[in-house]
Amino acid sequence: MKIEAIDLFYIALPEVTRAADSSQDSLVVRVTADNGLIGWGESDGSPLGNISAFVMPMSHGNIINLNESLLGETIDSPEDVVRLRAKAGRYALDLQQVDHAVSGVDVALWDLLGKYLGEPVYRLLGYETSYPKLPYSSVLFGETPAETQRIAERIRSDGYNAAKFGWSPMGEGTLEDDVALIAAAREGLGAGPKLMIDAGVIWGSDDGAVFERTERFAEFDVTWLEEPLLPDEVDAYRRLKDRRPSIAIAAGEGCDFYRAAEDLMVNGGVDYLQIDVARIGGITIADRVCRRAQELGVTYVNHNYKSHLTVAASIHIFAGVEEFKLFEYPDGVSPLIRGLTAPTGIFVNSDGMVQASDAPGLGVEANVDTIRQYLRQVRIEVDGKVLYETPVV
Amino acid sequence: MKIEAIDLFYIALPEVTRAADSSQDSLVVRVTADNGLIGWGESDGSPLGNISAFVMPMSHGNIINLNESLLGETIDSPEDVVRLRAKAGRYALDLQQVDHAVSGVDVALWDLLGKYLGEPVYRLLGYETSYPKLPYSSVLFGETPAETQRIAERIRSDGYNAAKFGWSPMGEGTLEDDVALIAAAREGLGAGPKLMIDAGVIWGSDDGAVFERTERFAEFDVTWLEEPLLPDEVDAYRRLKDRRPSIAIAAGEGCDFYRAAEDLMVNGGVDYLQIDVARIGGITIADRVCRRAQELGVTYVNHNYKSHLTVAASIHIFAGVEEFKLFEYPDGVSPLIRGLTAPTGIFVNSDGMVQASDAPGLGVEANVDTIRQYLRQVRIEVDGKVLYETPVV
């Protein structure tokens, strides 16, 4: 089949706040083939920045937009998707934004191909079986240990068997303040459920400060300490690892391309690698990273905080790898998380586990009513020529 | 002083071709302070993509546009420029395009500050002396060895004492074909002038193929072999280095942020690191990379193929480091290379050397007539609100 149209929909809540919550907007990508089949995907990052990558005027042979590299192309096999991802990357080699922008269309192409071949994406990636994953609820600490404990109790009563607590006020007070927060989170969850801690890069490049924490946090059975250091500070991650901390270290959401992920694993020595399929360049690249993680003995985990289009895309990547058991499950209140798919995305089953769908493609469809409701009207003109105008959904 | 306005000018030649020639367009950045002083800079990459970074609607606390993070800010010292570069990066942490986009405004802020304090940028960076650099002319191989020899003879007669020959048809035929091209380039230059070879990533991840070439090319006194491998293939660069090739290895133009450059030096083992100030996030970041290169014993070289605004910005970064002697000097015919500054940018002196200006700031001013002549009219609207419209120059 041939790629006949690529339509981009910028959706956003009526009011976007400064909260570190990426479920406030999205760029939804619809790919239509000449046989009428449709694939869906979603890019993280700035919707306007990502739209630009599809329509920017050519600057030279290494800055050619995504529409130009993909429209009219043939896609009949997994090899075609991989080929087109490489072509898009080559045509836009000198566009920094290319990885975020291409993520949504790469996901949509895998969805489209799965529908065409009647296979779920994980099978297209060469896996036979889809293993269940343990979803973890991702929340912020309370302002105090007591409030943190109440949040943990709520999560437990919601049926989750794993939770991740994130950043402020951790790292803003004393070491003992931090320990009290972790103790409260564990107290609220009770023994048993997995507890992860997200430090939100609070210790910059200070591996010594991180090591002090890991040694104190360990008694609360913490599965990992996430992003204790800045993404650029790969050497500091290595120094931390060389101290042999008593808790595993996780990082990776900021990886925008394959090498950044490999660098964190090989040189940073992280134990858990957290990859966002809507940022790193789509399923094609996340799959490559996931295989490299297996070679290196690093545990792959998804990172996502967008809609169930991305939740679905995320799970197919490592559905077939039994030993990668944890799954980040966006648990926020934005209608763009669960409302963007119909019927509503990926469920937690009665065992508290999630699993990739066996339906063709991603296994979820976009809800066009939601797209219509939150759609922003964008218009980009250069020298009087309209390069982009929000399409009809 | 305070930052009162940031104006963006997208300029382009009337016809942009697929040639790998980044002097066909540009995004010129003008920063105006409340005291009337003006600073100029330029970003490489897609002009439309870069404009988006200045005006994109907020997505959440880590995707806030560059105008929001910089307008109204105070700048009185080098520490202020470094602080604002960090602020812009933090506000746009999850915008992939941020480094390309912020490059031009970071350069403009250094220019502005230099004018305010009456100092050339290299002194603001802490250097006392500006050392002369040897410029090299950057050209493509001819289709045949004979044609390559004629090009080399022309460069020599133009007075250059160094030249870099780039990519096709090298790597497309046999090893002997490649050797014949290098031999012809050396024959045309004669003994003495430096000869560099740019492989344009032709050998992908095949360090063995590269090693075969370095051992054969060495007899022609080649200063470096540039980008023999893909930017992502840092492990392949390391394998190549471990073979102890007889020619130095250069790479780095694709580095979009600090860690990518550090990774290539520490893990890739490159001998020459080529940094584009208009891509890596401006003078602030290029300066940090340059200092790290000194620590690691790697030779820093500029990469640029835009106007003399960027040529000027490039030289200030390592003007004060005597042992970094080579300078990439864009030698193309595009009017956007020499025509964008008035008087015309940085000259090669009678000794064939270039040197950073001692005038305040970058030492060059933009030519507004050229901007007017090549200006593209851009308009970006979201929900009927105009986010960007090409300003009057």
Image (cartoon, coloured by chain):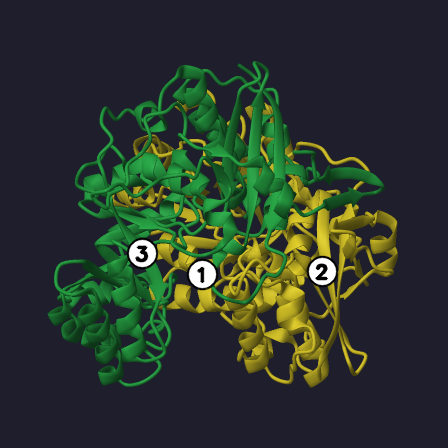
Chain colours: A green, B yellow
Mark number, residue B258: 1
Q: Chain of mark 2?
A: B
Residue at 57% across / 52% down in the picture?
A46
Residue type at mark 1 is Tyr
Are discs 3 and 2 located on one and the same chain? Answer: no
Q: Residues within 10 Å of mark 2 (few under 14, many from 20)?
A: some
In which quadrant is the N terminus of chain B drawn?
Answer: bottom right
Instruction: Give the x, y percent position of residue B257.
Output: 47, 58
Residue type at mark 3 is Ser
Quote the CA–CA distance across marks 2 and 1: 30 Å
Residue B339 shows in this picture? yes
Residue sitting nearer the eye, A151 or A77: A151
CB-based contact (under 8 Å), mark 2 and mark 1: no
Q: Nearer the viewer, mark 3 or mark 2?
A: 3
Local secondary structure at mark 3: strand
Instruction: Give the x, y percent position of residue B272.
Output: 43, 53
Instruction: Give the x, y percent position of residue A240.
Output: 22, 67
Q: Is residue B37 left or right of residue A201?
A: right
In which quadrant is the C terminus of chain B drawn?
Answer: bottom right
Q: Residues within 10 Å of mark 3 (few under 14, many from 20)?
A: many
